[in-house]
Image: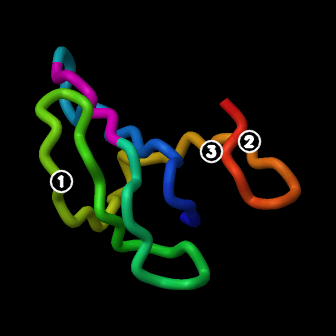
Amino acid sequence: MKARTGDHIIIEGRTTGETKRDGEIVGVRHSDGTPPYDVRWLDNDTVTLVYPGPDAHVRHHEYTPDGRRNG
């Protein structure tokens, strides 16, 4: 898994009926984009350190050639 600051990480619910979590990656600790990540959760605006498990995936944003986020 690789991510950049500004991407979103989605944690799927592990049991039936469990709500998934969505957060914005606000910090990437490794230059190659591998975990762990500092994530600001959209449901409560807190920032936590996340080591994603198999129930997680990254939603990448498109970037312009100069590295700025598109949209």
Which residue, given by chain and number where applicable, does mark 3 sit on? 60
Q: Earlier in the sequence, mark 1 or mark 3?
A: 1
Secondary structure, mark 3, is: loop
**Residue toward you, 32 or 12:** 32
Q: Are marks 2 and 1 in contact (CB under 8 Å)?
A: no
Pinpoint residue 15: horizontal percent, then vertical percent: 19, 29
Q: Residue 62, which numbered label?
A: 2
Give the magenta range: 18-23
Task: Indicate the secondary structure of the residue bearing disc 1.
Answer: strand
For the residues labelled 2 and 1, the Cα–Cα distance comes to 23 Å
Q: Is residue 22 inside the magenta stretch? A: yes
Where, by quadrant of the figure, is residue 54 drawn? bottom left
Does residue 67 appear left or right of residue 53 in this picture? Answer: right
Residue 9 occupies quadrant: top left
Task: Quickly name the residue at label 1.
Answer: 47
Q: Amino acid at mark 3?
A: His
Furthest-top residue in this view: 17
Q: Are marks 2 and 3 in contact (CB under 8 Å)?
A: yes
**In the visual, does 53 lie left or right of 30?**
left
The three-letter code of the residue at mark 2 reads Glu
Q: Are marks 1 and 3 in contact (CB under 8 Å)?
A: no
- Horizontal and vertical percent position of residue 22: 33, 34
Q: Residue at x 26, y 31 (%)?
A: 42
In terms of image quadrants, where is residue 43? top left
